[in-house]
Amino acid sequence: MKIYTSSLFLGIAVTRLGFGQSASSTHSDDTALANGKAFARFGFIVLLILTTFSSYGTKIVLDAQVFNSTDVTTIVRNAINSSADTIVVKNTGSPWIVQPITIFNKSNKTIIFDYGVTLKAKSGAFADTYATLLKLNTCANFKIIGYGATFEMIKSEYLDGEFRHAIDLTDCNNISISGLLVKDSGGDGLILMGWEGGQYFCNNVRITDCVFDNNKRQGCSIISAKNVFIENCTFSNTKGTPPGSGIDIEPDSEDEFVENIQIRKCKFTNNFGPGLSFGFYKLTSASRISVSVDDCYFSYNCDPLAEIYQGAEISYTEPKNENLTGLITFNRCFVDGSYRPAFAASKSAHNMPLIFNDCVFKNVSQSTNLPYNYPIWLEVQDYRDPIQYLGGITFARSTLEYRTNYKFAWINGWNNSPGAKDINIDLTVIHPTLNTVANNSAVFSNVLSQVNVNLNIRYLSSMPSKSLTLTNTDNDTISKRICTKKSISLSSPTASSLPIALNYTVTGTASNRIDYHQLKGFMLLKQNTTQSSDTLQAINPQLNSSNLSAILSPVNNNGNTIATNAQFIAKISPTRCNPTTITNTKVESSQPTEALMLKLHPNPASREVTISLEGFKGESAVQVKMSDMAGKPFLRQQVQPGAPEVTLSVGHLPQGLFIVTVQGSKTAKSAKLVITK
């Protein structure tokens, strides 16, 4: 351990104490260390000096001198509880093993977990069902920075309960968390909540570039919060106890808050429950609600086996006969494959509106074994007591594409409701056979009357032709040193008559989410526009001092949308920004030519898939790679150059949507693969 202050003299004086070495060499575990005399002397001296000179600003570095492989709970806790304003946890090559850590009423801290650090739950130490890996209670002005670091628990040990969270923020203010992978908790990856007797909410919380994977209850729960900004994050593989959502916004009482929640450029994939769920059962007319979900990606959430009422990619419920005020909006979101509906809700027209603008819902409602598996599902809040009109839903300038034999929407009333009200659906419906108003109109079941119900539906049997260009807007290298940005452009020579989404994979020597803010993996061209843009911003100059590249490769959507094997390439410099050449990629479509298509059979697949290697003849090396939509690699295999095809076993992979890439020495092709069970 080392301690640094802003005064050179003080820094030398403290560092020379050498307490870290004596403590770690005397005791092998943290319990003994906490009880030992060496650690008692260490704690007294350090805290005395830090308190005396706290006005200078102090940094504590936790490194190999204090590390042990058994238990470092007290070391980490005492460092955070000290008066030091910065704590750096170094990568020692092994996990930092801890018992539950709670920090109470602390402020003005920056905690930096170096690249490769794992803060891991100690086996057997989380028997209490409320034990949390890291809990901040009534804390303020905390920054937790962990690009390339991991918070890891042991989900397989937590057979009971649903509250063993990885990160718990209770009654906290001004908290930012960035760059972490948070996985395998026995509850939520992250929970934001309040506590009776305190302010009863978290305020001003920013979560950036984090991945929440394989958590038991939710990727993230928002119980009571104001001014929350979640951006460039991934929520994936939640499974273990309901709801099993990527994010669940669900206050526990009428006194809690859901105000100014902004979710931007996030990915929700392969969660057992909904990608995003809203449970407003406990709120009342006094509640003020505001949520915006912008430029987010949803794919294969809500497993067909999930016993969840109103299972869907996006699910919404609210109390009956309350007049909730506020607004929830979804802007430019993309649902890219689902066994369940794109959206399901129990909603009153008298509560705040839900509005979907410029969204694309593609290949949804795939399961034929689920009753009422309509792409859009809206129903009354109750089937017994008298209630108000159902409704308050708007879909504006959006696209819905699916193939199963359900009508595109089911609106279900009952005799305890006067009818449907304030339902506005402006939608392009694409279906190979159900493509007329005569055979695919919305179903209004048990709806006694309709007030301000407007349906503007355009029908197509397939996606129309469109030529797109995925490119950059300048030829400059971007710099990690000053975190500069580059605009990515998706353009068309003519305006699109409907919103179109284009997938792309992200490769290159730069790491997505580490060397630049996480890219969401798709771009969306809005209806009646010729151009849209996104931003690639370099970050973290301290992590990589090499020249790097970020490569965006459009994905072949198996003949359904836009595809090519050409690439967009951006150069990232660790220091200066000098002009360089960026590849401009012309993406041609209506249907990709045979030369550009990667052929997969069968698709969907359950046990094995055969991949055509046509077009790779003469390549010196050929490799097949498979990753999920979050970019997590699942398979990498070299194949014999010149072979006509290769058959791979996929029975061991989880169900969901995958990207298959065949990479040769000269050519690369990608395609989507759906794996079912």
Image: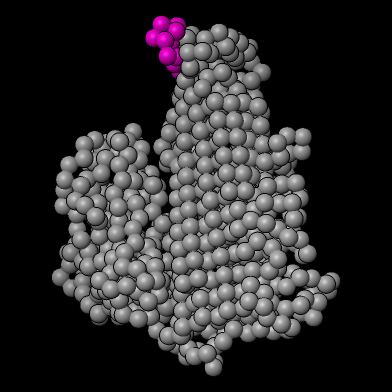
Part of the protein shown in magenta: 1-13
Q: Is residue 424 above or below residue 236?
A: below
What residue is shown at x 50% (from left), y 30% (from top)?
A: 111
Percent coordinates x, y for residue 109 in the rendering: 53, 27
Percent coordinates x, y for residue 511 in the rendering: 34, 48
Q: Is residue 25 magenta?
A: no
Give whichever of 350, 600 is nearer the camera.
Answer: 350
Give whichever of 41, 23 is nearer the camera.
Answer: 41
Is 301 on the left-hand or right-hand side of 556? Answer: right
Percent coordinates x, y for residue 315 in the rendering: 62, 65
Q: Is residue 4 above or below residue 548?
A: above
What residue is shown at x 52% (from left), y 46% (from top)?
A: 229
Residue 226 visible in image: yes
How many numbered markers are drawn? 0
Q: Residue furthest bottom?
A: 438
What residue is shown at x 55% (from left), y 36% (from top)?
A: 175
Q: Is residue 150 above or below residue 639?
A: above
Percent coordinates x, y for residue 119 in the rendering: 53, 37
Is 89 on the left-hand or right-hand side of 241? Answer: left
What residue is shown at x 64% (from left), y 44% (from top)?
A: 225
- Quadrant of the frame with the C terminus: bottom right
